[in-house]
Amino acid sequence: MNYIIGIDQSTQGTKAVLFDEEGVLVKRVDVKHRQWIDENGWVSHDINEIYQNVILSVEKVVKEAGAPRNSIAAVGISNQRETTAAWNHDGTPLGKAVVWQCSRAKEITDKMQDLAAVVKDKTGLPLSPYFPAAKMAWLIRNTIKESGAKDYLLGTMDSWLVYKLTSGKSYKTDYSNASRTQLLNLHSLQWDVELCEMFGVPLKSLPELADSNSVFGYTDFEGVLQAPVPIHCVLGDSHGALFGQGCHKKGMIKTTYGTGSSIMMNIGEEFRASTCGLATSLAWSMDGSVTYVFEGNINYTGAVVTWLQEDMGLVRSTVELEKAVEHANKKDTTVLIPAFSGLSAPYWNDRAKAMIYGMTRTTGKNEVIKAGLESIAYQIKDVLDAMEKDSQIKIKELRVDGGPTKNKYLMQFQSDIADVTVSIPQWEELSAIGAAYMAGISQGIYQKDTVFAKDKRIYFKAGMKPEERFEKCRNWEAAISLLR
């Protein structure tokens, strides 16, 4: 038996997922890491802790599945994308990573607004502290300056893990991750010297660019495996989910419901700029051929549920959440805008603050919980609307993945409010599946035509009356307009 390991290094933790030679999921292991949030609301991760959790999760998944230590053929890695770190050449971290959600670099981007059009034209991305270029600039001016380091490396989590897993022999990133840094020129497909100078990022500190299905190096996970195996795929987590969802054709679209959400549409092999607040990125590059996407990213979707549970104490479990929504007044007009760290696509308002709008005297705990859950679907609908305008393609099916897809109310409301069919795959580990399948295809173990045919899906179809949808959306838009 030849097994493939898919590693999904995400915002809340790390998943190691074992797949057999038919592409069937055999075992999954999750290891959480700490979220460092200071008094400023800055979000950080300890990258040494994350690396150790990768080793631990792989060790556990191999052991618990009973897979022989010499049976692993290859590894694919997907990662939380814009989270940005700095480290020395000996692999010593320079402080903690700046997490993708964190907007601490907004003062840097605020002072660069006269260059926003240049940045958007070159990278397909709106100038924002969300992206790694500004985070790197912040690290250079603060953490790295304080450390006194002169020769350092900067990268996203994929580059950090590849560097550590190969004992510093390989320092690479794939095009999907690079396209999200705001330093890659999407026209030349190279690091852009002018952009690096604008942000003050040394070109020599950036990783080598590579196809997503390249061999990124070899690792035995510090002796967990009997011999080193190839890391035969690296993808940003949302790109991994797009590939894992089988969205390989132009016009196909998926949404990942995680801490935040990535809504991504395959737009084919030619670059197209968005005029509706979306980003243009690379889905992946395989064997020298690139595929582009439109993408809208939302800071708080699944994290809204975490906020309701852990911060507000309104519910203690997903079961309680479902019961609260079931008992909420269906006619209540309360809207929750979860702008805890500003609003991202398609609004791009870094200074927006969260708020609750439209309450009445009868609004209670259950109604607020319902509003929080529905805010996820409203935000995604706004991105879907922008995608239809930019692409001139009518969206009929939305392929979805992530933990919140288990909530039937949310999935039905998403279908109703966006007027699309929501399609849920058999397995939820889509980022890991995408990375593992691409690695397995690259190794010749999987055949693309057959490995994706095994998926069994659940569908939610829209049933809301148009006039009801119109009123609900108008109420949401009234709330959003107050923040612009």
Image: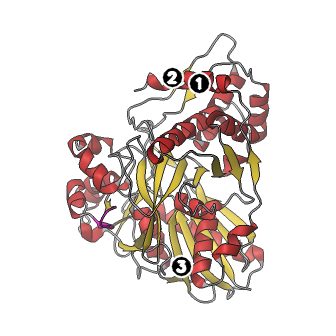
Question: Circle 1 sits on which residue?
Answer: 335
Position of the N terminus, as image quadrant, is: bottom right
Q: Position of residue 229 (x, y in %)?
A: 57, 85
Question: Circle 3 sits on which residue?
Answer: 232
The residue sitting at 69% across, 45% down in the picture is 421
Q: Position of residue 87 (x, y in %)?
A: 36, 67
Mark found first going from the N terminus, 2 or 3: 3
Q: Secondary structure at mark 1?
A: strand
Q: Is residue 259 magenta?
A: no
Q: In the rendered structure, are the residues bearing label 2 and label 1 in contact, judged by CB atoms less than 8 Å apart? A: yes
**Dot 2 alpha-carbon crowd within 10 angstroms: few under 14, some 14 to 19, many 20 or more:** some
**Disc 2 marks which amino acid?**
Ala
Which of the pair 272/48 is nearer the observer?
A: 272
Q: Secondary structure at mark 3?
A: strand
Q: What segment carries the magenta color?
A: 186-191
Q: Is residue 152 visible?
A: no
Would you say 251 lies left or right of 399 here? Answer: left
**Disc 1 marks which amino acid?**
Val
Mark pair 2, 3: CA separation: 46 Å
Q: Position of residue 183 (x, y in %)?
A: 31, 59
Question: Circle 2 sits on which residue?
Answer: 479
Q: Position of residue 305 (x, y in %)?
A: 64, 39
Mark found first going from the N terminus, 2 or 1: 1
Q: Is residue 190 magenta?
A: yes
